[in-house]
Amino acid sequence: MTDTERVVNFAAGPAALPVPVLEQVRRDLISLPGLGVSPLEISHRSPWFRDVLDEAVKDLVELLGVPDTHRIVFCPGGATQQFSMAPLNLLRGSGLTAEYLVTGAWGAKAVREAGKEGNVSIVWTGAEDGFARVPGDYEWEASPDAAYLHVTANETIEGVEWPELPSAPCGVPLVADVSSDFLSRPVDIARVGLMYAGAQKNAGPAGVTVVIVREDLLDRAPPGLPAMLDYRTFVEHDSLYNTPPVFAIYVVMLVSRWLRDEVGGLAEQEERNRAKAGLLYDAIDASDGFYTGHAKPGSRSLMNVTFRLPTAELDSRFVADAASQGLVELKGHRSVGGIRASIYNAMPLKGVEALTELMRVFAASH
Ligand SMILES: *Cc1c(COP(=O)(O)O)cnc(C)c1O
């Protein structure tokens, strides 16, 4: 491989970014046109960054159809910090209970953090069957007077995704961790009270978390929260209370611009994602049991496709064979084993086609 040749990167996160975005970053990296500094060096108070921030918000509003009841802010600390920040703002001191639908490892972590801030209740968990599916409508019931109902839209490790975000009871805010399927499909934001996405899966580099919050919920925060853990700080200061991760937000802006201008929006992106995931699930289903999918049909993720081969030894051999062909980062998470192919927005169809071809050849020869 030459110094600039790229592999097909199936990493779960940090994950592949669109090449046109990387090319723009490269053009700007030594010097932004007319400014003489790079995005890594420029002041967060500069007019350039003000424009970047404004465009990032504007593009996300447009892509997601965010209604004017909601605000978009950029927070540090990853999605993991949101596991605490959401209950700090919406649960602490309320005397209410926060309810959680747990469909994988990230949801389980979110519950643990929320339990430090108040009462939590798990309304459904898929732990017993190794987190292989989301529940059916009649398998769970949320309380109409909970502080909020939390859901993980896509469980990145298990490859389990809600086909559509569930509904919270009337008056209960739905809180959604959308880290690994943010911007992969249209979402009805009006139904969501709070949603958050660590950028490094599908929206940019690590270092920033996109948070969309319904403005009326801001008043629920108890007094005395640390400024950097209070959503109001970010809303009132347009994400510029302290030095934000300038570079990461700049890349999120470029990714949003790419989705708007080159992909043509989230409905188009969803179609592409369905086509890519469809190829892989078809390859699994057509393998006569050589490949076994982890997620049950109906809960299969469009972003993280998890499966295993007949033995762990064959799993390892498959990963090695793939790597020798430039298809990398296919080893499943240690808690699930097997293979995980993360195929976010930036994964080209050709990359998935190369993987399904390898699956066919590998199954035939083993
Ligand atoms: C990666 C991930 C997280 C954790 O993100 P960090 O940015 O590492 O804190 C949380 N939830 C989901 C669904 C994820 O995919």
Image (cartoon, rainbow, N blue to C red):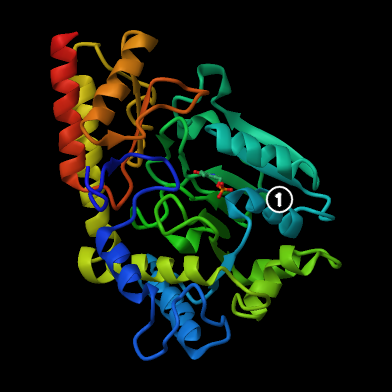
Which residue does the image show at 38% across and 76% down from the upper left? 30
87 lies above or below 243: above
Give the class, few, some or many, for how many residues have Cα within 10 Å of label 1's Cα (few <14, many ≥20). Answer: some
* Mark 1 secondary-structure assignment: helix
Classify residue 231 by image quadrant: bottom right
192 lies above or below 139: below
Classify residue 90 by image quadrant: bottom right
Horizontal side of residue 166 vs 28, given as left or right: right
Label 1 lies in ligand 1 vicinity (Cβ under 8 Å): no
Which quarter shows the C terminus?
top left
- The amino acid beneath tag 1 is Ser
Q: Nearer the viewer, residue 86 or 77?
A: 77
State which image quarter holds ligand 1.
top right
Horizontal side of residue 226 vs 126, given as left or right: right
Number of numbered discs overlaid on the protein picture:
1
Which quarter shows the N terminus?
top left
Which residue does the image show at 54% across and 25% down from the upper left? 126
Q: Position of residue 288 (x, y in %)?
A: 19, 11
Which residue does the image show at 46% across and 62% down from the upper left? 189
Q: Position of residue 74 (x, y in %)?
A: 56, 67
Q: Position of residue 258 (x, y in %)?
A: 28, 67
Q: Nearer the viewer, residue 365 or 236?
A: 365
Which residue does the image show at 32% across and 68% down from the upper left? 26
- Residue 141 visible to the viewer: no
325 lies above or below 177: above
Horizontal side of residue 296 vs 71, given as left or right: left
Which residue has dot 1 on it? 84
Q: Nearer the viewer, residue 161 or 36?
A: 36
